[in-house]
Amino acid sequence: MCIASYSIVYSSRTGNTALLARRILDNLPAGQRRYFGPPCPAACCAPLLFVGFWVYNGGCDPATQTFLSQLHGKQVVLFGTAGLGGFRGFTGYPDYCAAVLRRVKSGLAGDNHVPGSFLCQGKIPLSVGEWYKSQLQSDPHNAVYRAMIENFKEAQSHPNQADFAALDRWLRNLLPALKLPF
Ligand SMILES: Cc1cc2nc3c(=O)[nH]c(=O)nc-3n(C[C@H](O)[C@H](O)[C@H](O)COP(=O)(O)O)c2cc1C
């Protein structure tokens, strides 16, 4: 089995995680690529899988959960987007990201190896922002809804150029560990 071959598998409901997947695609050699697309058994022909997800209820989306649960003996590099970001005053963001990634990894069988993971903020659907606003209207002093609206506004510009630059850096640092021959 050739360590150099890889697949990029991603689940994306509204396009944020797809942008990260495309960026990873552009940064890796085409010759060793076996698959690029949604979770599918065909992706498993490669020993190295880049698996992209969107955060759902503090873990990964259901399609990714199912896909991850079927993997054995793979190197699995995780990447994803979350609606929650490091907005002003939210000091718990790094812990939140760590908890999400822990939960996602816990869905993998123990014979897989996760050499790296990346998470950044993604846009939140407008309907969710409208809902936060309506809640705040009926409860104007609610600090949680205020914070959620602030986070919603920040999220609308993500993933942004800084996120892509961070993704590029992360990937550059990770590649030697994946032994891809460039
Ligand atoms: C049903 C649902 C549940 C979500 N749960 C979370 C969550 O628990 N934490 C979070 O940070 N974002 C959550 N989000 C926001 C998405 O993770 C975020 O918008 C993500 O960037 C969407 O990625 P996509 O555009 O690739 O689908 C949720 C979104 C939906 C629709």
Image (spheres, grey):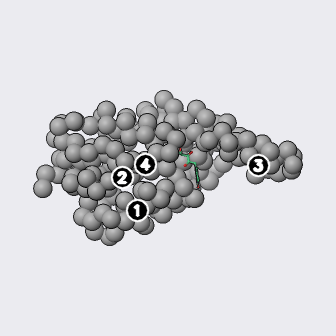
Q: Residue at x 76, y 51 (%)?
A: 144
Q: Please name which of the two marks, 3 or 1, marks the residue nearer to the observer.
A: 1
- Location of residue 5 in the rendering, given as x and y in whole percent from the top left corner: 19, 47
The quarter holding residue 121 reads top right
Q: Which amino acid type is marked by label 4?
A: Ser
Q: Secondary structure under badge 2?
A: loop
Disc 2 target residue: 39
CA gap between label 2 and label 4 equals 7 Å
Disc 1 target residue: 66
Q: Where is the C terminus found, in terms of image quarters?
A: top left
Disc 3 target residue: 145
Q: Secondary structure under badge 1?
A: helix
CA gap between label 2 and label 3 equals 34 Å
Disc 4 residue lies near ligand 1 with CB under 8 A: yes
Q: Which amino acid type is marked by label 2?
A: Pro
89 displayed left or right of 64: right
